[in-house]
């Protein structure tokens, strides 16, 4: 089936076209430049930008794929989680296209889509797999018996998401927002010489939960103390040390989840999966543990429309029932609701 996917949960207007597990096009517009000076995404600005970008981005996706609207067999849209106003723009647009084309509509979970996108590059996911979702708003370890309908959350962050920690630490270091990419770059010039805490890694701590707010505070305190003493702060060393702490915990817990559940396939998705150190350490530890690791290419880790089309296409092929015409947006859609 040819599936047209709509993603508007945050600042990216993403429109993707997928046939089966094949990526045909992935058109992206972002309002990030308008949010940057606020140090975070401003919901009203994001919603308005989605409205303006919607139709041109759909046309670009079609043109890039060499497809016509009349070729589309199904429409998929992120119905949550995310910013309500932003989600509503995508849901309204997707409904309009589905209705006009007379094709089924699938309201899908943004977080499951971050995992499903991997199938565009590496083929069908092994099931069960362990999935680690690490993004701007979420950090979870999932057991995935069937990505079309059965996702079990084994653990999650009890405070900040991994991406949120990158964004907050970047602010401490005077690096731009979003903080993941500049920290990743700075860290390549530095050494992970500072011992920052690894949250929830004690013997009695929950095995698959994360905590990153203590780490963020520790970094801020360390930088303040250096500055107070008039000691030069090496941004690359702080970035590398912080990043190492995050990556160490994420990869250790993901590998442990595989081992505990007898699963030998791990997939990592979400914006933080673009992190070069996370990708390298995950590969090392998976190799050592005999686990097959799958990570989407960088561009597909952060928000895009192809991931939504990828999950929609999978649902069509699995025979999952489409959404009702009154589909709405759910800003806090639970991670185990794949479609609705
Ligand atoms: P969610 O998916 O939870 O709704 P989101 O859609 O806003 O949140 P994504 O687009 O998946 O999040 O990811 C954005 C996050 O990824 C930001 O926090 C950003 O700093 C982080 N990120 C992007 N690139 C990197 C990188 N190279 N290293 C670390 N973090 C990164
Ligand atoms: Mg974004
Ligand atoms: Fe996302």
Image (cartoon, rainbow, N blue to C red):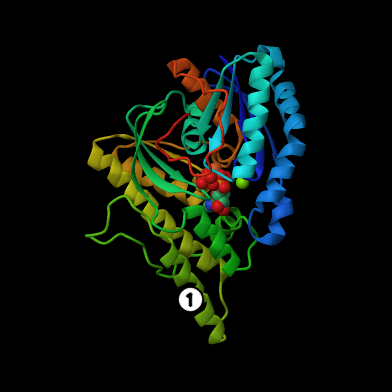
Give how far across and how far down residue 176 sits, in percent.
65, 60
Q: Quadrant of ligand 3?
A: top right
Q: Secondary structure at mark 1?
A: helix
Q: Nearer the viewer, residue 55 or 268?
A: 55
- Quadrant showing the N terminus: top right
Q: Is residue 120 visible?
A: no
Q: Nearer the viewer, residue 315 or 162?
A: 315
Q: Is residue 153 above or below residue 121?
A: below
Residue 56 lies left or right of residue 192; in this view the side is right
Give how far across and how far down residue 269 sits, in percent.
47, 40
Residue 6 placement: quadrant: top right
Q: Is residue 90 above or below residue 59?
A: below
Residue 73 placement: quadrant: top right
Residue shown at 54% from the left, 64% from the top: 169
Q: Which residue is mark 1?
A: 222
Please rate how many residues cluster around mark 1, counting C-alpha atoms within 10 Å: few if below 14, some from 14 to 19, many from 20: some
Residue shown at 51% from the left, 53% from the top: 163
């Amino acid at each position: 089936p040819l599936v047209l996917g709509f993603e508007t949960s945050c600042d990216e207007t993403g429109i993707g076209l997928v046939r089966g597990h094949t990526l045909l096009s992935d058109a992206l517009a972002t309002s990030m430049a308008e949010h940057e000076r606020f140090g975070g995404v401003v919901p009203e600005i994001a919603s308005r930008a989605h409205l303006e970008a919607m139709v041109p981005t759909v046309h670009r996706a079609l043109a890039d794929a060499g497809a016509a609207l009349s070729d589309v067999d199904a429409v998929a849209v992120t119905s949550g989680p995310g910013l309500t106003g932003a989600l509503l723009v995508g849901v309204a647009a997707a409904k309009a296209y589905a209705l006009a084309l007379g094709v089924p509509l699938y309201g899908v979970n943004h977080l499951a889509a971050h995992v499903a996108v991997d199938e565009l590059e590496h083929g069908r996911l092994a099931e069960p797999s362990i999935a680690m979702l690490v993004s701007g708003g979420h950090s979870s370890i999932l057991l995935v018996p069937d990505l079309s309908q059965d996702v079990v959350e084994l653990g999650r962050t009890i405070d900040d998401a991994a991406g949120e920690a990158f964004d907050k630490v970047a602010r401490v270091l005077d690096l731009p927002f979003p903080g993941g990419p500049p920290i990743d770059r700075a860290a390549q010039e530095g050494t992970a010489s500072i011992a920052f805490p690894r949250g929830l890694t004690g013997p009695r701590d929950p095995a698959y939960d994360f905590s990153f707010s203590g780490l963020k505070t520790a970094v801020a305190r360390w930088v303040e103390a250096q500055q107070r003493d008039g000691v030069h702060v090496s941004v690359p060393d702080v970035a590398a040390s912080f990043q190492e702490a995050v990556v160490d915990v994420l990869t250790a817990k993901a590998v442990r989840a595989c081992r505990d559940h007898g699963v030998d396939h791990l997939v990592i998705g979400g914006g933080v999966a673009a992190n070069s150190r996370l990708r390298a350490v995950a590969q090392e530890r998976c190799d050592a543990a005999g686990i097959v690791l799958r990570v989407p290419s960088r561009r597909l880790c952060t928000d895009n429309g192809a991931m939504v089309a990828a999950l929609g296409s999978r649902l069509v092929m699995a025979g999952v029932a489409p959404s009702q015409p009154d589909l709405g947006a759910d800003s806090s859609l639970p991670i185990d609701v794949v479609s609705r």
